[in-house]
Image (spheres, rainbow, N blue to C red):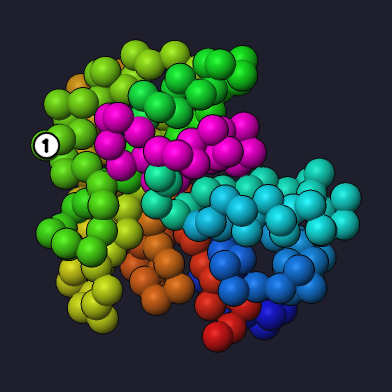
Amino acid sequence: MAANLAQVREAIDEQTVRLIAVTKHASNEQIEEAFSQGVSDFGESRIQDALKKRQTLPPHIALNSNWHFIGHLQSNKVKQAVGNFALIHSVDTLKLAQEISHAANLNGSTQSILLQIKMVPDNSKSGFTPEQLRSSLAEILALPSIKVEGLMTICPLTDDVTIWHESFSGLSALRDQLSGEFAVPLKELSMGMSDDWREAIICGSTMIRLGRAIFGN
């Protein structure tokens, strides 16, 4: 694991990119090792798995790490997610944003979120199209008790670097357009996973979500 982390950090170099270690297939021992190597951001796609891991990790890790929800968030899980994650990456509809806003408002918190965008057609992925986001963004930004930190995307499952580039550079350009149109920073771009993270960084990613590239198969 140390060699994997060193390789990623060398590629990141001096760029401002947050490394989120995806713990879906990682043991607590592996999470502890990653933390000892300086990783403090962890991502999970299942709420119950994240909560269980946090409860069974040593207290100093639980208290000094940030947990990100990166999976598809179902409406019936919103109350469990709000307040338990530093950032929800996968807000893919106006309705879901409204539900998160309502839940955060009820418990007196502000939940940070990213809006998931589908930059290229992909029936296996959820997310706003750029046109849908443009028509919904003003309403989302006006919701109480949420903070829109930026945008997220997941590439289609492909080895085609041109599709990776189209998706990542497209998201970066969309962020710049919307920031100007709506006068909102949208500083975070969560894009790049174990196969395509290098291309994502070239295109301006501020957060990469790596599981296999850190923990192995």
Give the answer, above or below, for where 149 lies relative to 181.
below
Give me the residue at 53% from left, 56% from top: 46
Left or right, residue 116 beside residue 215: left
Question: In the picture, which quadrant includes the C terminus?
Answer: bottom right
Q: Nearer the viewer, residue 27 or 215?
A: 27
The answer to which image quadrant residue 52 occupies is bottom right
Q: Position of residue 174 (x, y in %)?
A: 22, 41
Residue furthest toward the front? 76
Kind of residue at disc 1: Glu
Q: Position of residue 206 (x, y in %)?
A: 46, 50
Pointer 1: residues within 10 angstroms few (<14), some, or many (20+)? few
Give me the residue at 30% from left, 30% from top: 95
Q: Check disc 1 and report its element: helix, strand or loop.
A: helix
Is 78 colored magenta in this rendering? yes
Q: Position of residue 91 (x, y in %)?
A: 37, 40
Give the answer, above or below, for where 21 lies relative to 72.
below
Can residue 103 be seen from the camera position used here? Answer: yes
Is 54 colored magenta in this rendering? no
Q: Which residues are magenta?
A: 75-96
Q: Nearer the viewer, residue 121 or 25?
A: 25
Question: In the picture, which quadrant includes the N terminus?
Answer: bottom right
Q: Which residue is mark 1?
A: 131
Left or right, residue 205 beside residue 28: left
Give the answer, above or below, for where 135 lies relative to 210.
above
Q: Position of residue 19 (x, y in %)?
A: 57, 58
Left or right, residue 81 beside residue 116: right
The answer to which image quadrant residue 166 occupies is bottom left
Give me the residue at 79% from left, 73% from top: 29
Can residue 187 be seen from the camera position used here? Answer: no
